[in-house]
Image (cartoon, rainbow, N blue to C red):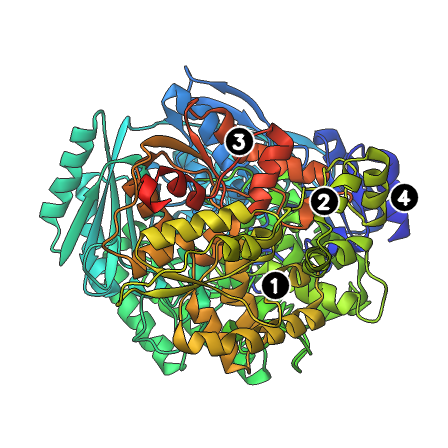
Amino acid sequence: MAGVRAELRGTVRGEVSFDVTSRALVTMDASNYRRVPLGVVAPRDADDVAATLAACRAHGVPVVARGGGTSIAGQATGTGVVLDFTRHMDGLVSLDPASRTAVVRPGLILDRLQQAAAPHGLRFGPDPSTHSRCTLGGMIGNNSCGSHSVAWGTTADSVSELSVTTARGDSLRLGRDWSGAPAGLRPLVESESARLRTGFPDLPRRISGYALDALLPENGADVARSFCGSEGTLGIVTEAVVRLVEAPRALALAVLGYADESAAAEAAAGLLVHGPLTVEGMAADLVRTTADLPRGGAWLFVETGGDTAAEARARAETIVRAADVLDSLVVTDPSGRRALWRIREDASGTATRIPADTSLHPGAGAGGGAEAWPGWEDCAVPPARLGAYLRDFRSLLAAHGLRGTPYGHFGDGCIHVRIDFDLLTEAGIARFRGFSTELADLVTAHGGSLSGEHGDGQARAELLPRMYGAEMVGLFERAKGVWDPDDLLNPGMLVRPAPLDTNLRFAVLPREPVDVVFGYPADGGDFSAAVRRCVGVAKCRTPEAAGPSVMCPSFRVTGEEEHSTRGRARLLHEMLAGELVTDGWRSTEVRDALDLCLSCKGCRTDCPVGVDMATYKAEFLHHHYQGRRRPAAHYALGRLPRWLRLVARTRTAWLVNSLASVRPLAALAKRLGGIAAEREIPRLAGTTFTRAWRHGVREEARPPGRSRVLLWPDTFTEHLSPAVGLAAVRVLEAAGLDVLPVTAAKPVCCGLTYVTTGQLDPAREVMRRTLDAVSGLLEDTPHVVVLEPSCAAALRTDLPELLPDDPRAARLSAAVFTFAEALERLAPDWTPPRVDRPAAGQTHCHQHAVLGDAPDRRLRAAAGLTGELAGGCCGLAGNFGFEKGHYEVSAACAEEQLMPSVRQAPQDAVVLADGFSCRTQLEQLAGVRGRHLAEVLAEALPPEDK
């Protein structure tokens, strides 16, 4: 390893990384497989690629090209050097609207090409569900397709020319009429032309094997097209000329409801005569909620285009009339279409969890149930045979005692499915092999392809002889020998493959339960199972936030894989494996990757498989610092409730504020407390919320029959923003609710600051004291209103997950209401005062991830607060943005959505920020005062209610 590393560092201008973290991040893609590489190279250009290949050839080290790492068959993993094209070779070189072509680098993300083409009325045809993070190089390597393949085909149909560097350093320009063909390829094809004319199934989604038939003269002897789908085994793409298509000016989406996926599959082929852009199918098992879908147990998503919305809708309605459906829905507005498409795109993640009871369809998704895995993710058969194939497929599943829910590109006969294979035991792995062999025969019997989109990789290459026969596979091996005589490039893929049941990524994980603090109820209390949730879908690697999405703010700022949810999950996986990351919970690599996790909990909702990195981070920090000195910020900020209560008891808030206003003293305090020098220390309230409330409470008889609620004095409202609490009391009382303070001899606290800094033993002590204090109150008043979203989220989720055996924790968790929820549920007939102003700001990340904001949206609309709040995270995120070393990332997170939304807001807009962190960030970065919704409504109350 030392020799090749030294040569690479001496000849490559890009990054050469052989450290533990860099290697751990690429041990897996989105497949069942794992390989530990020697190192990672991020080349700057084609010369760097050639230098890397030369060094690796000299030392006998294999090379694997990698894009977004979303491959599902294992072809983006390897034991040698991994080429990462996403760091530098990720640009759009040029775009020519006249010729409808673009020149792209291999690391360019598909969505960025689409964004550049859109102003010209153009787009790239293929669009996999991973379009927000997959790369053009990866799409070429896998011959990716996507939902619009019925209209625009596969990536191979969209490639014009390819610049390729071979394993021996030759630079080739591949195109039609044998352009760029390596020596020996043409004689090989011409000698086997009869076999090539008869040996390939005729279907739109035939991806398996090498596309050698593209080299026949009647097919234009197209070397570039033949290269597509070769999975990095023939050469390394350094540049590509791709064709663009004219994008319809208007779109409509028809969602057709059927009884089950077999009925939908039978109908799909008959819709193709109407020229749809998509014919996608999925069943209810994969849908978190069916509220936005027409009646049915399965659906076809059929998109149509036109020059106008009316024309697109008319085509969609023609398809609805031609289809025999239970129910249907036609949508033309962009936001409605996006919301529906998001349901389909998230299926690749939600399919990884199969409900424990198959009668439980909606909402089972990522919350629990049996784990399900790829491996037979994308078989394809002729579309007219899809219904019959699905029936046989279901029978084969039942015969092996397996379950899976098909979905995918029904119009092209391509089915995605995740199956509940047991890949942890010898018996389960043997069943995986047996089923795979029989399914390969079934697909072949229906005239299909083992891969219809994601390539063969290790998952299917071993079974290619069952599809093509030994002679054709032998021809594939000879073609590989022409391109790569040293077998340097991605060995073990497509030809001479590793067995499909080796290199499984689960084999290295501990078989015994890991001793942890959180309960992990959705994973049976098993931390390994929680980490296994990340299957590499990589939605967290999306470089721009879309709509209300939060995940993953630190990745979007840094662009580094280790700061994505997937990257952190990979490091935790390797920590549990103990092969690469060898020091377990004491690992500095894992600690450093988790350091920039904001604990925003965005992944808990935005990740299709429900990875909860905030919880994993808290768990790790607990073990990492157990029995050791912690960072100063953990004491200063993690134990903030303790310090603030001390100040309140001694009534010294005025003194703390005075000292904090003296710059040298404030600087010293920040340095000692591990607080970023750039931050201002927030001023403490002179009077706490509960004292101010008691002083102003009106002693008068309450009308009978009023609902009673307890108002939670969270740390931030109590000591820093009492005006928010007092405003909430006025509004809740105006709505006809009796508001009682949560006061007791012992202080109450949700434990949030202890949890986010991984101080889980103190957190549980605080939570138990809180339960002691409030359990009696809940007997009479089972509704607790929590104004701070992060505290409400902690009580909803962290409390029962840290104290799973205490029934009082579940009771308090169920009693928690947000401000808007309380008004909607407990005062449904109350009409809020009219504010009638535009609103700007950002939905709190914990509100988005844990609590939901639908009641808040309805309350704002009823009050006449117009406009949408931004998504993302404010970047302060409690203690995160105050900690030393986090300021730049914190500010950059705010600049992504929050600050632009405020700057672009109308002059009379109300800036809403229900979280103290969000308000502090607005004040310190923009000098803008954000207000809790309760404050805005309280100001608008009629005088008699104030």
- Density class for disc 3 (Cα within 10 Å; few <14, some 14-19, many ≥20) is some
Q: Residue furthest left?
A: 321
Label 4: which secondary element: helix
Location of mark 3 (residue): 178
Q: Residue at x 61, y 46 (%)?
A: 232
Asked if residue 432 is positioned above or below residue 383 in the image, the reply reads: below
The earlier-in-sequence mark between 2 and 4 is 4
Q: Secondary structure at mark 2?
A: helix
**Residue under circle 4?**
6
Q: Residue at x 51, y 60 (%)?
A: 793
Residue identifier under label 2: 654
In depth, the one of 698 and 174 nearer the eye is 698
Q: Is residue 471 left or right of residue 917?
A: left
Who comes first in sequence, dot 1 or dot 4? 4
> Residue 390: which quarter of the image?
bottom left
| Residue under numbered circle 1 | 615
Question: Residue 746's spot in the image, x, y percent?
Answer: 62, 71
Viewer-side label of 2, 4: 2
The Cα–Cα distance between marks 1 and 4, rounded to whole angstroms, is: 40 Å
Mark 2 or 3, closer to the camera: 2
Question: Residue 418: in sight, yes or no?
Answer: no
- SS class, disc 1: helix
Q: Position of residue 308 (x, y in %)?
A: 21, 26
- Of labels 3 and 1, earlier in sequence is 3
x and y percent of residue 708 in the render? 36, 66
**Number of dots carrying numbers:** 4
